[in-house]
Amino acid sequence: QKLDFAPLMTLDADVALPQKLDFAPLMTLDADVALPQKLLPQTPTIREALVAHGFQEEFRGDDMPPATLYHLGDSYSGFYAEFLTPLTGGEYTRSGKRKATAQIAGVNSQQLRFLEPLLNDPWTVELSMDDFGLPAPKAVRVANPMGFLAQKLLIHRKRCADDQAKDILYIHDTLQVFGARFGRPADRMDRPGSSQPAPKGRERNRNCERLALRQDDRRDSRGGGNRCRPEAES
């Protein structure tokens, strides 16, 4: 709509820059890579690209396909990557098989609950040639801080004590670095163009998630074990 007056404008930009800290933030030597359930076919696959650049596979557990860690170089380097994808619906298939893992783009990805906040509205960060030893700048996508905090809070009560302690440190450091730049949650999650579903869709998704969790509870009670739920393993 054409206006008969000049709209108000400012000369500043609200950019989500990190704050300088007076302490070293907590860091780990592993990378958790969140994948959607479906990716367009690509050549080479993610697995082929990892293997070609020196990553070695370590298979864990009895699930098929097995959960896999992708180590860079020898096992003593400390760095590894693992892939995670959202678990939707019940924890088991109709035939009774647990939906623990899935193969996506060639890699074996663990299926866990409450990963969607990590995939919604990611930030794009450019890695410079000098800082990362790259032949050219590289853009990568990372979870936005608010989505990261939401995911940690959603899984917190299902985590073991050691993991809960680590998550509290992650939450603390994230708030210290980005807290002053956070807008209102509604602005972040529901702004135009957001990948979040419409309100009715969100409510439907929540109802489906509650039903799936109740089904998981019933299966756990039948089994009588204390196995961690899928959301508690990330």
Image (cartoon, rainbow, N blue to C red):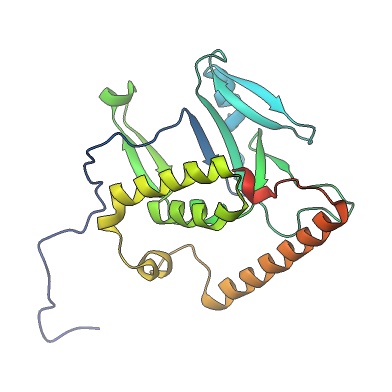
88 w.r.t. 34: above or below:
below
Left or right: 132 in relation to 227 = left
User: Of residues 111 and 106, which is closer to you in this image?
Assistant: 111
User: Of residues 164 and 83, which is closer to you in this image?
Assistant: 164
**What count of labels does the image hold?**
0
Query: Which of the image's four quarters has the N terminus?
Result: bottom left
Q: Farthest residue to the right: give it.
A: 95
179 w.r.t. 135: above or below:
below
Whether residue 40 is visible to the viewer of this picture, yes or no, is: no
Query: Which of the image's four quarters has the C terminus?
Result: top right
Left or right: 120 in relation to 128 = right
Q: Which residue: 84% across, 51% down?
A: 224
> In the rendering, at what x and y percent does residue 56 appear?
61, 19
Corner quadrant of residue 217: bottom right
> In the rendering, at what x and y percent does residue 26 appear?
38, 36
Q: Which residue: 12% across, 60% down?
A: 12
Q: Farthest residue to the bottom: give it.
A: 4
Q: Which residue: 38% across, 66% down?
A: 185
> In the rendering, at what x and y percent does residue 94 appear?
87, 56
Corner quadrant of residue 216: bottom right
> In the rendering, at what x and y percent does residue 47 appear?
61, 28
Whether residue 164 is visible to the viewer of this picture, yes or no, is: yes
194 w.r.t. 179: above or below:
below
Q: Which residue: 52% across, 74% down?
A: 198
User: Of residues 81 and 193, which is closer to you in this image?
Assistant: 81
